[in-house]
Image (cartoon, grey):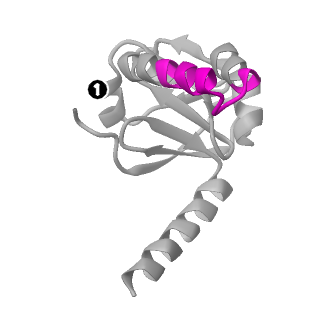
Amino acid sequence: MQKFLGVFERQLDVKGRLALPATYRARLGTSCYLTLGTDNSIEVFTTEKFDEEADRMQALQARGDISMDRLRTFSARATAIEPDAQGRIYLDDRLRGHAHIEVKGPVIVMGRLDRIEICSVERYERSMAAGEQEFSESAS
């Protein structure tokens, strides 16, 4: 399966819509899922990957590795969407609030191999600095 790679800076429009990069749209198909991501992000899944992630979350909860509250939040905040003709998706108030992104503000859209991640510029820069530090430390 082809992976989601790369990073793109985008701008939310006044209606809270975000244009996904064309390379990502081709992989997503006509529908996808949005849900809360870790570390104040929004995760975008293909339909197939969302089903896998939902099954994984249920198994984690059944083993007691995550709480029922986390499973409930994951499923309650998940939204099936269809990008419009321009490849835009709508990020509702709760998703935007979770990711600390604002209407008409800049956002980062990046591939995370099996999913797309949307986050604030500040969160992206913090994460990249920490990740680069880890690479530097492991190389020595």
Across and down, in percent, residue 109 comes to: 50, 43
Mark 1 lies on a secondary structure that is helix
In which quadrant of the rendered view does residue 26 lie? top left
Across and down, in percent, residue 71 comes to: 66, 21
Task: From this view, report whether residue 140 is shown above or below residue 53.
Answer: below
| Residue depicted at x 30% and y 36% | 23
Can residue 91 be seen here? The reply is yes
Residue 64 as seen in the image, left or right of residue 25: right
Task: From this view, report whether residue 85 is shown above or below residue 9.
Answer: above
- Asked whether 69 falls inside the magenta stretch, the response is yes
From this viewpoint, which residue is outermost toward the bottom?
140
Across and down, in percent, residue 94 comes to: 76, 25
Residue 59 as seen in the image, left or right of residue 96: left
| Residue depicted at x 51% and y 40% | 117
| Residue depicted at x 49% and y 31% | 19
Can residue 33 be seen here? The reply is no
> For the magenta stretch, what is the residue range?
54-70
Q: Main secondary structure of the magenta part?
A: helix
Type of amino acid under label 1: Ala
- Nearest the camera: 65 or 73? 65
In which quadrant of the rendered view does residue 113 lie? top left
Across and down, in percent, residue 102 comes to: 74, 38
Within 10 Å of the Cα at label 1, are there few (<14), some (14-19), or many (20+) other Cα atoms?
few
